[in-house]
Every structure is written in structure tokens, then in C-alpha cells.
Image: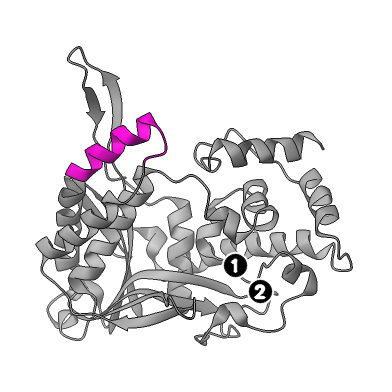
Amino acid sequence: MNNIDKKVISDPLTETGIPGVCQIFNWNHHSPSQAVYPDGNFAYRYWVTTQEQRRKFETNSNMHAGIAVGNAIAYRYAQKIFKINPSTKKISPYDQIPCELDIAIQKVQEEFDRYKPSNEKDNLKFHWYKETIPQTISQLEKACELLGVRHNVVAENVLSLHDPRLLLPIIGRSDIEYDLKDFSSIASHVGDHPFGLLEIKTSHDRPSRLKKDGTYSWVSAKVPTAPSRNHLLQVAFYKKCKPDHFVSLVYVVKDDFKIFDKNNCGDLQDENLENYYEQLVTIFKRRERLMMRYAEETNKEKIINELVQDLDPQFDHNFCWSIGSLFLNDAKKLWNNK
């Protein structure tokens, strides 16, 4: 839509004009990654718990393996990486000298080694992924070579939009952005796009059955035959922010990868990404309406008690509540009381 302000905000999380009730909850933006959570789970994560508490949510080896793969490709190619400035606690761009693949793999393996598995099953995955992460990174590098990721590469860029239909801005982080000025002349599939944008999704093996020798058999992760809706919602936001960019969505596993773009996937054609963006806005409008019913209320606990009565927590969701038993039990107590 032409009336959307696409300006890049210097520090989008400190923008003024946030409604008072949103400030009570320190809720100052929407994020495409938050849209994957059902409303009940989202409310617990971003309205009930604080940022400090969210940092204590239980994580897992799958998540950290995915971070390792993404970081490796940033170290391998990026001339600039956006990350938290330890002094200001704000996201800032840092210049970086790209390194060889083996050095990038070594760096992320050291980072991955610092993760402490949350339970016995997670520990099993942790040790398996230490072996498969380098293979997965190698597959992703092959995809990057095909996509022409070479020049003026930026990792984890902060993207923001002010949609006039929303009270809060939408803010996200792109995995990889790069210049196609040389590549577009030899690769007809990118057309006349001057830039490229790559969204990366990883999948990892899962343990199956315990064998007689005491080891586990593993089910190898597979690349999907089509992108998931949640990932398309994210990519739609990036395309809205960067309309001149040729957008690619790559799925990578330890022994394979699959690149989706508008040439081989109808969902990634411009008009369909526009439809997914509209779906994203619908989710955010609904959440704002929920919160703004309490625009005149100042008691946070009272608002929470009212909100949860109108939201289904969906405790049987397959991944949303993997936040640790302490917080899961707290959420169940909150909803059971209602």
C-alpha cells in the first residue's frame, strides 16, 4: 500500500506516541516472528511476562543449532552485522571482515558449546548437532553461492514499518541482504532486482528409538515441498520493507537445501506476498483491539485477569509452550483461575 511509511527508524523501540496502556506492558512494537504464536500464548509471552522473565524461558538445542547456522553464514559473508551494543543496549551495525568457511564453522561451534542442554533428551540432541551443524552450514553456503550472496552483504538488519492501520510499528530483522549488481547480469531468474534478501530456515534431525547397543537411531530432517504459512508471513513483511529486493526463502538440513522464490513458488510472487502481509496486519489489529479495550485502565494485574478470559491458551500446541515447566505451570495457574 502506498500510504505506508517505510522509513528506517534510528531506534524504533523508543518511538513516542505509544498508547499509555501499551506502555504499562512495555509493548511498543509488533514483530513478524511473534505472529507465529496463537493469541493466548502471545499474550503470556509479551503481556504477562517481562523481558527479563522471557530471557529465562527454557530454550533447546534445535533453536541454538539454528542460530549457529545463521551466525556462520553471517561470519562467512557479511561486511556488516547488526547486533546489540553492550554499552547502549541498542542494536547497532558493526563492520566485519568476512572469513573462510572453516573459520566461521569453528566460531559458531565454540558459541554452540556454551549452551547448556535443558534435559536428557535435549542433551542427546546437543551432542548430535555438534556433529551435524558443520554439514548444515556447508549446505547453506551452497545455497548462498547459487543466490549470488557476495557483495555488500548485511546480516540481521533492522527493518521497520508504520502502517497507518496500526497503533504500533512493525519491526523485524532480516537474515541476509546483499547487492545483486554483478550477479543479475548472469542470472536471469533475479530479473532487474538490484538487491537480494534471504530468509533462512533450518531443520535438524530428531532421535527415534533406542537401539540394543545403547545408542539412538535418528530421523533425518527433510526440506519441505512448500513454504509454511508462518514463514511466508515473515517474508511478506520483509518484501513490504524492501520492495526492490529479490526475496528468497531457503530451507536447509544437514544433507540438503531448497530455495523458494517467485520463480518456483506462487506464494512468493509479489501479489501473493501482499496478501500475506495483509494477513499479518489482521493479526496485529486484533491484538491491538484486545489491548485497547483497557485504554482507560491503569491496573496491570486487573487487565491481565480480564484479558485471559477472552483468550484460548492452547496448551496442547506442539511448540509454543516449550518455555520450561516453571513458566508453563504459571500460565496454567493463570488460566485455571479463570
Task: Name the residue nearer the viewer: 23 or 191.
Answer: 23
Residue 221 appears in the rendering: no
- Tag shown at residue 292: none
Residue beneath disc 2: 168
In what element is the residue under mark 2?
loop
**Residue 101 spot, x, y in % from top left:** 12, 64
Task: Please tell me which residue is depicted at 86% across the width and 65% down the height of the picture.
Answer: 298
**Residue 31 spot, x, y in % from top left:** 55, 65
- Whether the magenta-drawn stretch holds residue 316 is answered as no
Establish if 51 lies above or below 271.
above
Q: Residues within 10 Å of mark 2 (few under 14, many from 20)?
A: many
* Way the structure is coloured: one colour
> Where does the magenta region start and end?
117-131
Task: Name the residue nearer the viewer: 72 or 173.
Answer: 72
In what element is the residue under mark 1?
loop
Task: Please tell me which residue is depicted at 53% across the width and 72% down the height of the picture.
Answer: 171
Residue beneath disc 1: 30
Per the picture, the main secondary structure of the magenta-coloured stretch is helix
Task: Please tell me which residue is depicted at 49% across the width and 76% down the height of the picture.
Answer: 89
- Image quarter in which the C terminus is found: top right
